Image (cartoon, rainbow, N blue to C red):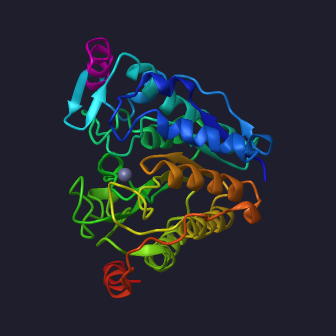
Amino acid sequence: MKTGFVLNDNHTRHTLSGHPENARRLESIREALEQRGLMEHILRVPDRPAERRELERVHTPAYIDHVYAMSFEEGYLDPDTYVRDGTWEAALHAAGGLIDLVRTVVEGTLDNGFALVRPPGHHAEADHGMGFCIFNNVAVAARAAQEDMGIGRVLIVDWDVHHGNGTQHTFEADPTVMYFSVHQYPYYPGTGAAEERGIGPGEGTIVNVPLPGGVGDDGYEYAFRRILVPLARAFKPDLILVSAGYDPHWRDPLAAMELTLEGFRRLTRILMDLAEELAHGRLVFTLEGGYALDALAYGVTNTLWQLAGHPERVEDPLGHGPMATRDVRDRIDAIARLWNL
Ligand SMILES: [Zn+2]
């Protein structure tokens, strides 16, 4: 496989010591890629700042202006979401880098890829940032694929432990983008109930699988196979984007889903098979959350080894957490019945 990645060097300009979403996250990933020799197997795609017209497909002009102005003042968009001197550049490069990675995959230069970018994006709404997110990178990239690259239908899969409220709201009335999310619930940000299934012409293209903590690898895999796979087959995407947060991992300090690195491997395999079957293999991951640095670095490098066709290099030195996982098949079956599955 020809696999690519983007690593936005500008991300270090957006950081805050003591905040979980800080520059160490991406630097830990960079170190892991170098230590494990991955850079020789995958191609680096240069990043660039997103253009204003690209952001305006998702965000209001007033909000874009607000972020720009705030970058000179330093402050907070909400109690969790800081803005610093370099936030503007970092956020533009996160969105622009993902767009160009998607373009290289759509054009066929690469088979698949992973955008190693921050700040993350899936909580960012049209007119406000929240939850550590400034611009909604995956939503901006999906719109760029549709408007500039000739892509018709996009499937966005979000396995971050939190619900991607911003992504859902961007596309909830749009039948050409399907958004599928498995997340801890009830939990931050509060959205993502199973009954939220899209509105108007978009009804049936928002798919939420809210689950209690402690689900573990088997629960996530069951949700993917029982609900995502059949709905994706019916939707027939031309491109699959993945909001990949590694905060479902058992070591993560912000959540309690109890996944292992092996669990992420199984989910990645399902997505690779779906992309191959439905979307000419076009599959692009983008980084969202993940705050335990070792789990994050192993999780991302494993995903890249797998995308690049070296599944034998996937490692799980962290193993299982101390908590027992729970069987949530009944709950997933009940959600599946909402979808007549
Ligand atoms: Zn998250």
Among the 4 quarters of the image, the one containing residue 71 = top left
Give the quadrant of the C terminus. bottom left
Instruction: Specify the segment rendered in magenta.
Output: 63-74
131 relative to 6 in the view: left or right: left
Q: What x and y, as percent, mark residue 338?
A: 31, 79
Front one among 311 and 123: 311
Quick check: can you spot residue 101? no
Residue 288 in magenta stretch: no
Give the image location of residue 101, x and y in percent.
63, 38
Please provide percent x and percent y for residue 284.
59, 49
Q: Quadrant of residue 46?
A: top right
Residue 181, position as x, y percentages in the image: 39, 62
Residue 68 among magenta residues: yes
Taking the image as drawn, is residue 248 in sight? yes
For the point 66% across and 63% down, the residue is 315
Q: Residue at x 73, y 50 (%)?
A: 111
Would residue 218 appear left or right of 252 to someone viewing this image?
Answer: right
Please, which residue is most extreme toward the top here?
A: 72
